[in-house]
Image (spheres, rainbow, N blue to C red):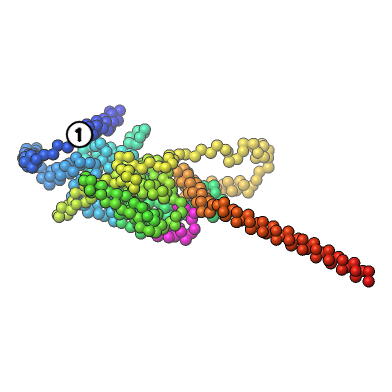
């Protein structure tokens, strides 16, 4: 009970502090003069010297200074930080698509560590960690005493080694999970053609399913390949699934949106000055050839995922379905400091083509579809049938089949998993409906002038037909008269 109270207090305390910080942020910033800044820097040096000399143990000067720099940056926002040489190298390794750890994207949230989303197929994903979960302890050490970089470092390690996480999910008791670290190879794009659950196997209505798990250096190339192959298979439309995608490179997000657009703005980034605006536009060439597109998002869709969803939504190119996205609409940049270290700092905000800021709001789906469980209301087999009679004859072949099914029972197939994914099924339903609607829209409406021409042509055909019938009758009468004369002779 005491342990649970400590965890709850730890979660409540940062929330209270956050409320005070938010009130302060609403107040206008009071800038210091150069002289005042110099005095504060002198005070910082004095604090450093006094702490180093007075601390009860040997002080680690490098650790103290790095913490001071990191604290300075994290006071700005949760995404700005100081990157040591090791941190900077790890960041670049991750961006290239391969790194060691648990495969989990996290952020700092009011002093706690919050999960943005796990990466598909990684130890974190397999352990059932979900977007929105909070990590309170790593190897029994509270995260509230750590910076975000320190928390990330503790979760990384040699592949095959284990790490213990304490997780709190909404409405559930805290649980402890032991995960085995692995080399995380991010396969950014997966694709296949799918059919709606329960649809006829022989149907030609195949839907292209494209899953993007993150936006890395190779995402654009992988997507182009996926679209090329699915187009050759003649799919009727696409489901672009960016659920639980934590984001990645801005350039990758722009390229992904561009693949589905022929023209229009994709995203704009705006800095602190009104003139600091950079706009990105689509180039001609829709790789999906104008076919219907549904983008699937959820609470774990962040940053680059939101850029893609917002661009396709605002340009009227796709319908967005699912639940409200995460709401990370800020741009970070790494600024190297020349000695292998760098700062990771927020430099701008993202805006969708309609001028909507993603920050703290996210993307609102056109059609909200919350992940749900499908309940079957009708029994597969009736309670009352021939088999329900006490002394009915048995079907020996059926009994053999039942035994075989029981022996061969394994985990769900991909098709069975798809059938249980309520959001995916509704998205595919929508693609099929949009495809039919598009086919009807391609029909050219009949104008009154065209109708008059068709009516005139029909009248001419009718007149011609009537004339032919009259000629046939007259010809028939002539033939009969000739026959009668022949008979008389």
Badge 1 element: loop
Taking 181 as reference, is 468 left or right? right
Q: Is residue 72 above or below residue 282?
A: above
Q: Write the residue at 51% across / 49% down.
A: 437
Given residues 364 and 478, the one toward you in this image is 478
Q: Does the magenta stretch include residue 226?
A: yes
The answer to whether residue 85 is visible is no
Question: Which residue lies most toward the bottom here?
Answer: 489
The answer to whether residue 486 is visible is yes
> Residue 61: image x %, image y %?
10, 45
The span shown in magenta is 224-240
Taking 278 as reference, is 237 left or right? right
Given residues 436 and 239, the one toward you in this image is 436
Q: Name the quadrant of the C terminus.
A: bottom right
Given residues 411 and 26, the one toward you in this image is 26
Q: Does the magenta stretch include residue 44?
A: no
> Residue 219: image x %, image y %?
34, 56
Residue occupied by mark 1: 27
Q: Name the quadrant of the N terminus.
A: top left
């Amino acid at each position: 009970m005491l342990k649970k109270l400590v965890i709850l207090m730890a979660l409540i305390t940062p929330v209270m502090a956050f409320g005070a910080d938010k009130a302060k942020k609403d107040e206008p910033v009071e800038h210091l003069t150069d002289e005042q800044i110099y005095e504060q820097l002198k005070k910082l040096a004095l604090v450093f010297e006094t702490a180093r000399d007075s601390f009860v143990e040997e002080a680690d000067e490098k650790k103290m200074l790095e913490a001071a720099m990191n604290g300075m940056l994290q006071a700005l926002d949760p995404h700005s930080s100081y990157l040591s040489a090791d941190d900077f190298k790890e960041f670049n390794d991750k961006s290239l698509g391969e790194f060691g750890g648990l495969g989990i994207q996290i952020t700092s949230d009011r002093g706690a560590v919050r999960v943005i989303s796990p990466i598909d197929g990684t130890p974190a994903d397999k352990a059932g960690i979900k977007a929105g979960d909070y990590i309170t302890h790593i190897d029994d050490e509270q995260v509230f005493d750590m910076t975000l970089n320190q928390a990330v470092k503790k979760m990384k390690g040699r592949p095959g080694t284990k790490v213990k996480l304490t997780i709190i999910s909404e409405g559930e008791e805290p649980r402890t999970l032991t995960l085995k670290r692995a080399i995380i190879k991010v396969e950014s794009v997966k694709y296949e053609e799918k059919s709606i659950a329960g649809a006829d196997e022989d149907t030609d209505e195949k839907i292209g399913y494209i899953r993007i798990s993150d936006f890395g250096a190779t995402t654009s190339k992988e997507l182009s390949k996926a679209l090329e192959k699915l187009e050759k298979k003649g799919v009727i439309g696409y489901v672009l699934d960016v659920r639980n995608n934590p984001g990645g490179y801005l350039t990758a997000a722009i390229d992904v949106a561009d693949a589905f657009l022929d023209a229009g703005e994709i995203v704009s980034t705006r800095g602190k000055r009104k003139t600091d605006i950079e706009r990105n536009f689509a180039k001609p060439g829709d790789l999906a050839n104008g076919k219907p597109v549904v983008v699937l998002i959820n609470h774990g869709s962040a940053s680059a995922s939101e850029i893609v969803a917002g661009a396709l939504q605002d340009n009227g190119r796709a319908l967005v379905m699912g639940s409200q996205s995460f709401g990370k609409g800020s741009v970070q940049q790494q600024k190297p400091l020349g000695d292998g270290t760098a700062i990771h700092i927020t430099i701008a905000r993202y805006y969708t083509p309609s001028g909507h800021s993603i920050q703290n709001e996210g993307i609102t789906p056109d059609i909200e579809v919350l992940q749900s469980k499908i309940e079957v209301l009708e029994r597969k087999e009736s309670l009352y049938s021939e088999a329900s009679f006490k002394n009915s004859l048995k079907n020996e072949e059926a009994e053999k089949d039942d035994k075989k099914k029981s022996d061969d029972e394994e985990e769900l197939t991909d098709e069975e998993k798809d059938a249980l994914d309520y959001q995916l099924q509704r998205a595919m339903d929508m693609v099929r409906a949009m495809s039919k609607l598009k086919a009807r829209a391609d029909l050219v409406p009949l104008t009154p002038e065209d109708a008059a021409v068709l009516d005139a042509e029909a009248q001419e055909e009718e007149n011609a037909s009537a004339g032919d019938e009259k000629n046939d009758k007259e010809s028939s009468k002539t033939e009969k008269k000739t026959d009668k004369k022949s008979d008389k002779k």
